[in-house]
Image (cartoon, coloured by chain):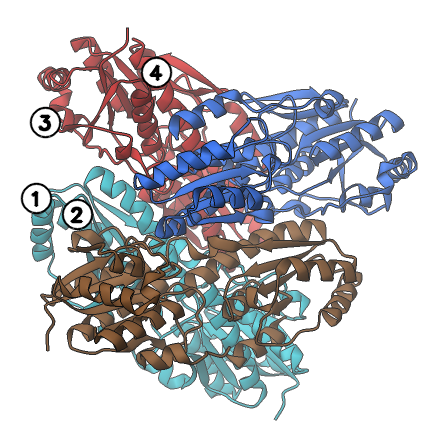
Chain colours: A blue, B brown, C red, D cyan
Amino acid sequence: MLKKAIAVVTSGGDSPGMNAAARAVVRTAIYEGVEVYGVHNGYSGMVHDDIVQLTTRSVSDLIQRGGTFLGTARSKSFMTPEGRKTAFENLRKRGIEGLVIIGGDGSLTGGSLLSKETGMPIVGLPGTIDNDVWGMDYTIGCDTACNTIVDAINKLRDTASAHRRIIIVEVMGRHSGWLAMMSGIAGGAEYILVPEVAFDLEEISLELKEMYERGKRYSIIVVAEGAGSGVEIGKIIGEKTEIDTRVSVLGHIQRGGSPTVEDRIKASMLGEKAALAIISGVSDVVYSFNEGQVVGVNLFEAVNNTKTLDPELVRLSRVLA
Amino acid sequence: MLKKAIAVVTSGGDSPGMNAAARAVVRTAIYEGVEVYGVHNGYSGMVHDDIVQLTTRSVSDLIQRGGTFLGTARSKSFMTPEGRKTAFENLRKRGIEGLVIIGGDGSLTGGSLLSKETGMPIVGLPGTIDNDVWGMDYTIGCDTACNTIVDAINKLRDTASAHRRIIIVEVMGRHSGWLAMMSGIAGGAEYILVPEVAFDLEEISLELKEMYERGKRYSIIVVAEGAGSGVEIGKIIGEKTEIDTRVSVLGHIQRGGSPTVEDRIKASMLGEKAALAIISGVSDVVYSFNEGQVVGVNLFEAVNNTKTLDPELVRLSRVLA
Amino acid sequence: MLKKAIAVVTSGGDSPGMNAAARAVVRTAIYEGVEVYGVHNGYSGMVHDDIVQLTTRSVSDLIQRGGTFLGTARSKSFMTPEGRKTAFENLRKRGIEGLVIIGGDGSLTGGSLLSKETGMPIVGLPGTIDNDVWGMDYTIGCDTACNTIVDAINKLRDTASAHRRIIIVEVMGRHSGWLAMMSGIAGGAEYILVPEVAFDLEEISLELKEMYERGKRYSIIVVAEGAGSGVEIGKIIGEKTEIDTRVSVLGHIQRGGSPTVEDRIKASMLGEKAALAIISGVSDVVYSFNEGQVVGVNLFEAVNNTKTLDPELVRLSRVLA
Amino acid sequence: MLKKAIAVVTSGGDSPGMNAAARAVVRTAIYEGVEVYGVHNGYSGMVHDDIVQLTTRSVSDLIQRGGTFLGTARSKSFMTPEGRKTAFENLRKRGIEGLVIIGGDGSLTGGSLLSKETGMPIVGLPGTIDNDVWGMDYTIGCDTACNTIVDAINKLRDTASAHRRIIIVEVMGRHSGWLAMMSGIAGGAEYILVPEVAFDLEEISLELKEMYERGKRYSIIVVAEGAGSGVEIGKIIGEKTEIDTRVSVLGHIQRGGSPTVEDRIKASMLGEKAALAIISGVSDVVYSFNEGQVVGVNLFEAVNNTKTLDPELVRLSRVLA
């Protein structure tokens, strides 16, 4: 059931490795003799007919770049059935018989509606630094974001140590504490505050006070954005401990940067897998890695279920602190 | 007029290269046969008698580290004549006959009072990332901070380009626009807002709107903290342009990190110069680089005059944008 | 069967993450109420009785450091039964009842002999950048080394492109092509020469000549050290293609550097696992990750079997090139 | 004496910042209302008429890139008067009335011949990592190369320390020891061997032996390529000291990488200066920085004189080691 043409779109927040994934989709399709189109600016470009044919050349010198060369954007009209119908027609008039979507939870949900309503075959890849998609332990960009955060923690440690400060680092992750947990353990943080685990700022402040009285020179507290505002938590801890406390909200630097080897390789493997699957007739599946293997997760299950934080990480963070 | 013993203190906000400077002070003193002491935690440690003798070993494996191994802290008592008298006595009882101070404007001012009131010979080195000390075009750490900021801009560019966003980057610098200007030019920013040059957000917003209508994919606006709040400027520009605008306040990562080659070498040269000067009887001088040469600036002039931004940089930023 | 005391040793070539693993061994043992000793300078220190007790403090500020704070060295005497007997006695006289060995193939083989001859319980962790240990798809340091190589390839690409050159990059890996394959794919290399796959320099040269005639600006060829000398391969390709060809032998920089998040986290998990296992009476097992899960591999099987390169990687490298 | 059109060429070995310089030449010319052409592949493209007009767009997204987007190459025909005549005619037929050359010693010499023989006005910028051009203390790319080398030394230090090794690092610099001296001091090297200063391997080996007997864990020796082969020096030192000695020849990674802030800013300033100068009728001048100021050096003097190593650096390296 070989397709004549497929398309690839990146949607939602960008993440490092999206380019590597899209590149692999394009090269695999061409290797298989299938035409491949790129949709610009996410679903918005799909509705507004901003779709171009891609060649091997279109994706050269791309594997090392952050962001997405296709662009991404929000689209209000794609959130309506009419908008999705227009998007579908724009694909079909070019003979496109399958779509690879690279994006986060919201983008995959949008794709599931397109599939249901129009019958356009859809294969998804999880493109988000948050690693919060159900059914998989990897999302494209999560490894790069962790390394970016740890690099920032290293710099903050210098200045924290010079001043005997408490440094609060607020990191991304939406409802998930995964990024905070990974970067906190790897960065040697004293506390890691995540939405999945209850914490008591009173108790933490008391412990910190004791540590500093015993001579501790600095401490790093990583706060997942889902666990509360870094600024507010810093204010409370500063007042309770009476230790000089500073807050660093890392912000959008976490989404950028040249992808790590892991993100490049895994994104490339997933891009190839997605292209082969959509070409051979698969639909409504999100591909990613779980326990080191490529897995296909039902698109509707992926977007309707909520991933929970690995309790093993939580435990490890306590033993090592 | 060779001294028997000297001391070195780091004070105020830390900056990358302080360790390289202190290491050079220590090694030069020992090379010259003079004892050398380190004061812990800035003027606070000087008042509270936290002063230890240093050896060549004390400063090994240090040139590549950010922060300051001596620590730094604020001291309310040093701001009083009594506190400074106590500090002086703590130095003198160890036979310390000269003091090298590595710190910013405020720290050098504190040193000038100590010198005036107690007669303790003082030599200063400008340790601040802000490059805002009068009489010199270099301060220890400014090169590392610029490179850290440009690295962050690179990451922000990825995500700005993916989303067709305007990204506002707020950088440090206190009253000075130097850090913003250097990193803005080097990072290819579209606008650089500094306290020294008037700007009109209305006009900038209009220009941005036109650029995006002509197809521009992203723009970076670097804002010096002295020119206004990045968050507020971002809000105004976002409203006026109706373009998706995000703000990144880089914060304390700008003070950390392993120093660049320039900061290591210049800090080392200045540390050597300061040690030789204080040993040979010089006092009330701040050493740094100006136009590529080591210069000695009168301590009182350095702290009482205000440095202005090089107009050449301002002009260059306009030609290249 | 709780132990009273255990020891940890790092042996063979160092790899980034060894410190994180040793730190986790130490902290876990102390958390479990078991004394923990560190052996300096590998098996040499075990024979020469260079063994010290460690505390939580001994391993603070260590997770981010490359190399190994315990040191490592070759030991001729440990290669004899007498040497191993002495080593055993040095452990036993301190009440050490179990040993965690962090090292590569050769070091684990040494450990297996110690276990057989003296009955000392042994648990191993694979500390090598080569990722060449049987029964697992991860070794401590391999992710950092890949990222270091890809960073170098990025720099080489700049100069290759400027000069229309062919650049040959020789990377480590001993008998294994894993490092070359991973970094070659992630670095976008045109050819990846590994010992596991036959290649024909004649054919490659012909293809390269054609590519450059069609306008190609540069190409990167990654050569695993096990596949031949980069210098010789470069000479042959340069002569056959008559294209300017340069060789870069990356050398020992591949072993150093601050470990990546993946290496820090996995090394920490494995350190904890090894400590818990040796304390609870396990022996003759090497722990690592395989397909995303911690696995225990029989020590004798691990050292007596040869790992083969994942054919999936080889295939992927061809589709994407 | 305003020109109608100018051209810019990059020649010889590439260096980081060449793109920033060329970008500034292009933008300045356009700002001044002068047409600007880019010559591809160095003098070779000038002879073979590979010359294209450039716009502001041609140089966007370029300031952060290593290498040179114009390409560079050796040209045998340009080394003959006939070749230079052809090159001249290719420029003149497009109305090009001035040429900015960005390159090292050899490239500037080629330019001086073109100027003499054809009367084509020439302005040069020193594009080389070696910092070996007479009359100036800066060349484009030298700061980036130093930081790349120091980054490599950091990685080598990890592994040197783990094994108690001596590590020899061979760095570039042709006849000059500048790169070795700067990176050696900044990297905390024990010895720095440069062509400008005599050294005695016998004596060094004796000193090293003593240091290691007193407990030293590692040492780094930086060797300028002009001072001898790192491999041979390593062999001699390894034999004489009987300490495990390894050699790392850093090679072409030293020429690549994204330029530092200093190289971006200085290259931009020099590019602007060169464009303004050639437009206003200047010829036979090389612009660079000396003692922090832009200076113009006579082209023939620059290529006919030999720069000597700053003795201050040599002295500093001894005090700090």
Of B123 and C10, nearer the camera is: B123
Of B280 and A213, nearer the camera is: A213
Describe residue C239's horizontal placement relative to residue B90 as left or right.
right
Residue A152 percent location from the top left of the image: 47, 47
Whole-Å distance between the Cαs marked 2 and 1?
20 Å
Whole-Å distance between the Cαs marked 2 and 3?
28 Å
Amino acid carrying mark 2 in the image: Lys
Of D16 and B288, nearer the camera is: B288
Q: Residue at x 63, y 42 (%)?
A: A19
Q: Secondary structure at mark 2?
A: helix
Q: Are marks 4 and 1 in contact (CB under 8 Å)?
A: no
Q: Which residue is mark 4?
A: C276
Residue C316 percent location from the top left of the image: 57, 31
Whole-Å distance between the Cαs marked 1 and 3?
16 Å
Q: Are marks 3 and 4 on the same chain?
A: yes
Amino acid carrying mark 3 in the image: His
Whole-Å distance between the Cαs marked 3 and 4?
27 Å
Q: Are marks 2 and 3 on the same chain?
A: no
Amino acid carrying mark 1 in the image: Glu
Q: Which residue is mark 3?
A: C48
Residue B121 percent location from the top left of the image: 21, 74
Whole-Å distance between the Cαs marked 4 and 1?
38 Å
Q: Are marks 2 and 3 in contact (CB under 8 Å)?
A: no
Q: Are marks 1 and 3 on the same chain?
A: no
Label at residue D235: 2
Q: Residue at x 51, y 70 (%)?
A: B175
